[in-house]
Image (spheres, rainbow, N blue to C red):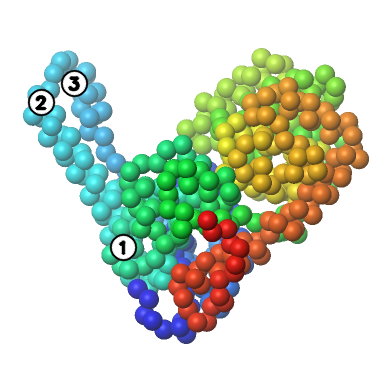
Amino acid sequence: MNDGTSSRKRKIIYVESNVDGTVGGSYFSLLFLIEALNKSIYEPVVVFYRDNHLIPCYRKAGARVYLFCRCKPIKLGCALAGSERRSGLRLVSAVFRLCSQVFQKTFNYLFTFLYPSLKCWFILRRERADLVHLNNTLCRPHEWMLAALFSGTRVVAHERGINQQFSKQAVFWARRLSAIVCISDAVKLNLIRAGFPKDKLVRIYNGLEAEKFSASKRRNVVLRELGIGDGSQIIGVVGNIKQWKGQEVVIRALKRIRDTFPNVKCLIVGHVASADQWYLEFLKALIRDGALEDAVIFTGPRKDVADLVNCMRVLIHSSVEPEPFGRVLLEGMALKRPVISTRIGAPLEIVVDGRTGILVAPGDPEELAEAVVTLLSDRALAERMGAAGYERLVSEFTVKRNVELTESLYAGLLGSKDQKTPVSGCGKV
């Protein structure tokens, strides 16, 4: 796809393939990258797999946006089984079953992989793309990898998860990627253990600019909007409501925290996807059983997260499974809030235990409650940790550094003489 000239801008196709209905850290990480990207060298085009409220922000940042629609796979087996039950038939002939299975697999292969791959190929041809950057994971979407293979376009995949296992298809396509960007050493080491090629792994931390994550409302105004009195001690957890995020542990810890601070209030901030609605109902039942209705507030998804975090005395990160990164920790650090996090995954790389926050065992409400009580009881300690966290953010986790390393990776892959030479120390294994 590259025409060989060094004068034109390098066109990067960014693919955000999330379809579960949540707008999480991957969206914001990509937005911050595009906002700071050197537009004199790179021209960003962003492809979303579903509509979302951040699209105007991407356009304002200088990106053109596509919405990419895929066919949903069909499941004839389930439909036929239901038809058999309704009609009272006990068996369907083996030949008919075999034919239906062959048809289902053929249809799904054609219309959920080959046809989307053709659409991707047309986009790459039309845009004269130099590079495809998959924003979520190396495990999907494979249609862009096939299209890039036929168009001769390089592909970079961001890995933002810690998966316990990978499909053979994911491993196959990963070996054809030009690079895999890992958002933490925890993610990188997980891929190494899974047998992915070390020479393609590059660690680039997510970044946050402290001055851009700041409160716009006064604390008493926000508390009044939430129906909380000024004398309350506010703690909170921010993140999509999912079982592995551990909101349950926070609620169980809250019962113990109230023994010392009966006026404590806990904000649970985040979106819940339809697939996780059961977990939200479980949390609400847990709150009712513990008589905590007056102590817990579900805010839902909010655009004013900075205002809410600014109201908190302590920000909690409660994941019970290894966290690939934990952007919310950076948000707490930006507002000089002490953070409490579980000691698994990437938070071990972000939080300095005892200096910028406190690390606790995952799934342990007693240890979590003890840490919260410690910080609520000692305002001076909480303020020292918050200040130290802010200093760590501005020295280690800036968007500027993230963009420098990303552009360095692009330069090394595309090899244009206009571009700066790759920066050393970018986390390559």
Q: Tell me the CA gap for discs 1 and 2.
A: 39 Å
Tag 3 or tag 1, which sits nearer the N-term?
3
Q: Quadrant of residue 380?
A: top right
> Is 417 or 297 nearer to us in this picture?
417
Q: Is residue 222 visible?
A: no
Q: Quadrant of residue 299?
A: top right
Element under disc 3: helix
Numbered tag placed on residue 196 in the rendering:
none
Tell me the crowding category of disc 1: few under 14, some 14 to 19, or many 20 or more residues within 10 angstroms, Cα based. Answer: some
Q: Which residue is mark 1?
A: 149
Task: Give percent across and percent down for residue 402.
Answer: 62, 61
Task: Give percent across and percent down for residue 157.
Answer: 45, 56
Numbered tag placed on residue 94 in the rendering:
2
- Number of residue marks: 3
Tell me the crowding category of disc 2: few under 14, some 14 to 19, or many 20 or more residues within 10 angstroms, Cα based. Answer: few
Q: Tell me the CA gap for discs 1 and 3.
A: 43 Å
Which amino acid lies under the numbered mark 3 shown in the image of this protein? Glu
Left or right: where 401 falls relative to 44: right
Which amino acid lies under the numbered mark 1 shown in the image of this protein? Leu
Q: Residue at x 60, y 31 (%)?
A: 320
- Nearer the camera: disc 1 or disc 2: 1
- Nearer the camera: disc 3 or disc 2: 2
Tell me the crowding category of disc 3: few under 14, some 14 to 19, or many 20 or more residues within 10 angstroms, Cα based. Answer: some
